[in-house]
Amino acid sequence: MIAITSCKTEVKERDGKLKIVTTTTMITDMVKNIGGDKVNVKGLMGSGVDPHLYKASEGDVSKLFNADVIIYSGLHLEGKLEDIFEKMRTQQKKTIAVSDAIDKSGLIGSEYFASSYDPHIWFHIGYWKQATQFVVSELKKLDPENADSFEINGQAYIAKLDALAKEIHAIIETLPVEKRILVTAHDAFNYFGKLHNFEVVGLQGLSTATEAGVQDVQKLANFIIEKNIKAIFVESSVPKRTIEALQAAVKSKDHEVAIGGTLYSDALGDAGTVEGTYIGMYKYNVQTIVNALK
Ligand SMILES: [Zn+2]
């Protein structure tokens, strides 16, 4: 339970800008691209932070209470913040789940989440464009004075996402389809797989809240040997010991599998770096995957 103490630490900006609190780094990046200097964006999670396990600090709770609007991913990605979002709504606080932009028929089902869907939608660039459009229209409603600015910025960002999709497609085309098997720490890449025709296997399942068992590791080690997979991948927001255990299991069966690098799955890279943006993260991931599996 989180004790909610209102207003005590209120830090209301006097600049008249819409105060937005975002959750994951992917959303923070998107909202900053749309809002530009017309809004005040505070992201709760930094690089390397796992949204599945993230709990709100006292400071976060006061940020959330002082926000004009809260923008989050949804589909139970931020599983431990759901109760707070609910509380915010009962207090008439505006909350926006970007996953509401995606038609349910396009979502991948999952028994692991209370939402019944895989929440890692940002890896589908088309869905991320829809999410961007959705946030643009919501911000226009909340701050009509700056509607033109949100629209122009949003369309410019969508154009960049279109260019990203083309660039990524060309890189992935260089990897033969039979080599498109992506083994990572947890199942964050199902939408990526759907979009780019990869078979995707996560050691820990869809949420990092469940640990991989010894049997899972042995089973996946056999799969890697059988399919002659060259490399497996660590994720920046998941401890690397699980993937190292998998590599060791393959080795114990007299085979070698490389660790192909660290992918950004549920969090972007450090702020101020190329990988600290959604577009930079996506390119980095694809280059890392293609180079290691070729
Ligand atoms: Zn995840």
Image (cartoon, rainbow, N blue to C red):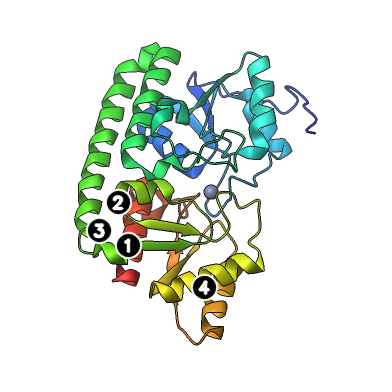
Whether pointer 4 and pointer 2 mark residues with C-beta atoms closer than 8 Å, the reply is no
Q: Which residue is mark 1?
A: 180
Q: Residue at x 58, y 24 (%)?
A: 67
Q: Which amino acid, by three-letter code, is at mark 2?
A: His
Q: Which amino acid, by three-letter code, is at mark 4?
A: Ala
Q: Which amino acid, by three-letter code, is at mark 1?
A: Arg
Q: Secondary structure at mark 2?
A: helix
Q: Which residue is mark 3?
A: 172
Whether pointer 3 and pointer 2 mark residues with C-beta atoms closer than 8 Å, the reply is yes
Q: Which residue is mark 4?
A: 221
Q: Which mark is residue 196?
A: 2
Whether pointer 1 and pointer 3 mark residues with C-beta atoms closer than 8 Å, the reply is yes
When the figure is inspected, residue 181 is found, relative to residue 123, above or below; the finding is below
- List x then y, in percent, for residue 204: 58, 57
Whether pointer 2 and pointer 1 mark residues with C-beta atoms closer than 8 Å, the reply is yes
Mark 4 / mark 2, whichever is N-terminal: 2
Quadrant the C terminus occupies: bottom left
